[in-house]
Image (cartoon, grey):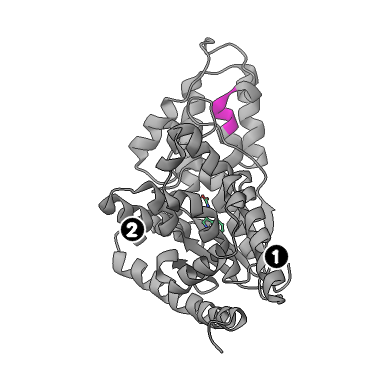
Amino acid sequence: MNHSTLLTGIKPTGVPHLGNYIGAIQPALEKIQNLKGQSYLFIADYHALTTLPDPQEFKQNVYEVTSAWLACGTDPNKTIIYKQSDIPELFELYWVLSCLTPKGLLNRSHSYKAHIQEKKEDFQIQMGVFNYPILMAADILLFQSDFVPVGSDQLQHLEITRDLAGKFNHTFKTSLMVPPEPLKEEQTSLPGIDGRKMSKSYNNHIPLFCSSEELKKKIMKIKTDSLPPTAPKDPQASIVFQIYKEFADAQQIQDLEHKLKKGCSWGEVKLELFELLEKKFQTQKETYQEFLSNKKKLDQILNEGAVKARIKAKEFMQQVRKTTGIIH
Ligand code: TRP
């Protein structure tokens, strides 16, 4: 991964939850830390527009997601962090790629098919949903990204991106487009409070940053069995333990395992999880609040990121224009 470029996009859906942290934030930041080359991290706000969110909430969500990634350790001096909507070159590349995209390629997209299943009628699908993968390809190809950390639900989008890169290169006899390699995240899918995969859409999530009261309330709601306090319990079958072990160190895991096997009340175990999370995220939580209450600072960080990103974007689009014969 020497001197390679890594890029990832985050949809602004509000405060991330513990599942996002384990599944996306932590692994991406780890990869960035070990990277010698340039890393790009952007808020995919125009992708999120496909769901037509409430404008005020939408704005706030962008700030929340940005604050969360910064609080978790994104260094704007090392990683170029920006909003997708601040890079006009992207939308130009998006059009160029659209001119190379066979409709059949997008007909096969899982997310489009899922929408058809939901809405039943093809004519009701918005073009933004249908063209979503082309915009994502533009996000990646514009910065000649070698690696893209993604969850398994995004692998098909990476395949489409590789297809379009090949198509462009073949059509214009060039090697301008770099087909990206996906860096697939290990699927440590964290259970939510009801035991299903933690997800906002199931409303079973625990926010990464919230008040202590809210955190405690959520943890107390985690589903448990009805064994009496003294009964020995199987740690592997316990949702509380499944969450605990993702955030604890080896010694803490061993201790709690021992406690459960010996027998103790669920209330006690939940309290241990609460204390662990409170302590682990204390500093990040404070940093998060600081950022969130300083929108000027956030705007400044995002603007500076956009300026840096556009240096590369402008230069690259100029090459695309030349290659396609738009300019001479
Ligand atoms: N589609 C991604 C998601 O839903 C977000 C995204 C947009 C993205 N553009 C990207 C991720 C480019 C990686 C690279 O999570």
Residue at screen point 51% across, 60% down: 135
Residue numbers of the magenta segment: 238-242
Q: Is residue 205 in sight in this rendering?
A: no
Residue at screen point 65% across, 48% down: 185
Circle 2 SS class: helix
Is 109 or 311 nearer to us in this picture? 109
Report the magenta stretch's main SS: helix
- Horizontal and vertical percent for residue 48? 41, 52
Circle 1 SS class: helix
Q: Of discs 2 and 1, which sits in the foreground?
A: 1
> On the image, numbered disc 1 is attached to which residue?
166
20 vs 140: above or below = above
Measured in 3D between alpha carbons, the distance from the residue under mark 2 to the one under mark 1, in whole angstroms, is: 41 Å
Magenta run includes residue 243: no
Instruction: Indicate the quadrant where residue 205 lies.
Output: top left
The three-letter code of the residue at mark 1 reads Gly
- Horizontal and vertical percent for residue 10? 49, 55
Is 269 or 157 nearer to us in this picture? 157
Residue at screen point 63% across, 31% down: 255
Is 258 or 98 nearer to us in this picture? 98
The three-letter code of the residue at mark 2 reads Leu
Indicate which disc residue 292 carries: 2
- Horizontal and vertical percent for residue 66? 42, 59
Residue at screen point 65% across, 25% down: 236
Q: Is residue 46 left or right of residue 315?
A: left
Quadrant (top left/top right/bottom left/bottom right) for the N terminus:
bottom right
- Horizontal and vertical percent for residue 127? 44, 51
